[in-house]
Image (cartoon, rainbow, N blue to C red):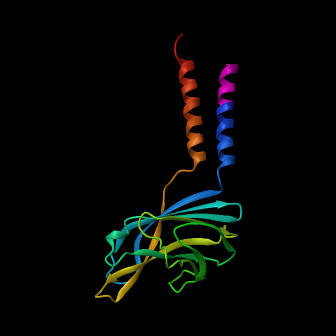
Amino acid sequence: MNNFFKRVASGAALASAALVASPAFADTYDFGELLDQSGAPATASFATLTANVVGNDVQFTLTAYGLEQFKGKSPWIGALAVDGVKTGSIDNVSGDSSVSMGKSTEGTFEFRFNFTDKDSKLSDDDTMSWTWVGGAGSFDAFAVRVNGVKYDAGATTTAWYGANLLAVPEPGSYALMLAGLGALGVVARRRKPR
């Protein structure tokens, strides 16, 4: 019986260690619901954003894919609008474009991250990452602007799409599940006739 408790205790310790090691939260968003501009597709999955909160900062990774579904010459992602408080600064930029903070003119979104590099744009199969220093707890929703599209005989050249939160379990959830399965296995093994 003493061996049983040791196994359960070690499983609980592993699960606790996984929970402590995981960040406050890491959410993944998919962009695809048209918010603004006529003529563009009402739904179109073409980008994902991971927002990983670490302390007071938010680490973003934005990946573009499937932009060829839009009409126009080489569509690209031009901005990420944020419904939240414009605070902090940008650091640790890596990837296919540069990032700056600017005012948003779109609906309820207070500011945006602009991807402003004219020579290398965030287009199909491109990924970029950056840290929003001091941004933790300062956002509620996101939207991206697709530039270079052509709808309504050229009258529509950009389109805004909103983000939907994807259900992605945290690493700590997997650790707890594995610990629980291990405990069930130990109990089932002990109940077998010898």
Q: Which residues are magenta?
A: 1-9
The N terminus lies in which quarter of the figure?
Answer: top right
Q: Is residue 5 in the magenta section?
A: yes
Residue 54 x/y as whole percent: 67, 59
Figure check: 155 above or below 75:
below
Q: Is residue 45 covered in magenta?
A: no
Return the x and y of residue 175 as percentages of the image width and height: 59, 41
Quadrant in the picture for residue 137: bottom right
In the rendered image, the vertical position of residue 15 relative to residue 8, given as above or below = below
Name the side, left or right, on which 134 lies relative to 144: right
Q: Is residue 4 above or below residue 66?
A: above
Instruction: Say which residue appears at 54% left-offset and 20% top-offset.
Output: 189
Residue 140: x and y, percent?
Answer: 58, 71
**Res. 42 image quadrant:** bottom left
Q: Is residue 110 above or below residue 5?
A: below
Magenta part, dominant SS: helix
